[in-house]
Image: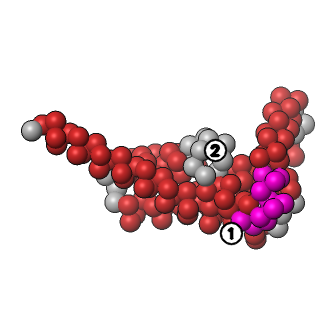
Amino acid sequence: MVHWIWITVLTLLPIAELRGGLPYALVKGIPWILAYPYCVLLNALVAPIAYFFLDNIHKLFYRWRFYSTNFDKLVERARTKLTKKVERLGFWGVAVFVSIPLPITGAWTGTLGAWVLGLSRRKTLLAVLVGVAISGLIVSAVVLLGIEALDFLIKDFQK
């Protein structure tokens, strides 16, 4: 039960997202068939959570200078990273951006960028889901291949 709580927290955190939750789940021995859909769907929920925050809570926080300064920097970074992709590829630009499993690319930044660029919510939610699903496959492959390689090395070392 404790592992599922950590998986949930890691998957929803803006820094870790699926890149943190899914490897944690797999390393803890949770079967991929359970971990992958759980982490993907949970990370895809970031988009509606982010929209709720941006529509409601953000307006209250924006009155604080510390928040507004940092938020404006984050928005500018998201706009810079996403504008070219979205202008060229539209829906797929957001999906590709979210699918790259690197820091500062993911559901949180993708949703923020789509919000800044005025993309429709429906397309954003779908693009985030597609991007997170692809990212989950990439992360799964890297982690599972890494686990297999470690198992091979450990077994070879024990001989």
Please report whichever mark, 2 or 1, sits nearer to the chain's N-terminal start: 2
Identify the amino acid type marked 2. Pro
What residue sits 52% from the left and 48% below the top?
A: 19
Q: Nearer the viewer, residue 7 or 133?
A: 133
Q: Nearer the viewer, residue 45 or 73?
A: 73
Occupied quadrant, residue 99 = bottom right
Location of residue 104 in the rendering, given as x and y in whole percent from the top left corner: 66, 42
Classify mark 1: helix, strand or loop. Answer: helix
In the displayed structure, would residue 140 be above or below residue 125?
above
The answer to whether residue 148 is visible is yes
- Residue beneath disc 2: 14
In the displayed structure, would residue 134 be above or below residue 152?
below
Identify the amino acid type marked 1. Leu
Location of residue 152 in the rendering, given as x and y in whole percent from the top left corner: 22, 45
Residue 116 shown in magenta: no
Magenta extent: 82-92
Residue occupying the far top of the picture: 66
Q: Taking 140 as reference, is 101 left or right?
A: right
- Residue beneath disc 1: 126
Occupied quadrant, residue 135 = bottom right
Gap between marks 2 and 1 measured at Cα: 19 Å
Residue occupying the far left of the picture: 159
Q: Nearer the viewer, residue 30 or 154?
A: 154
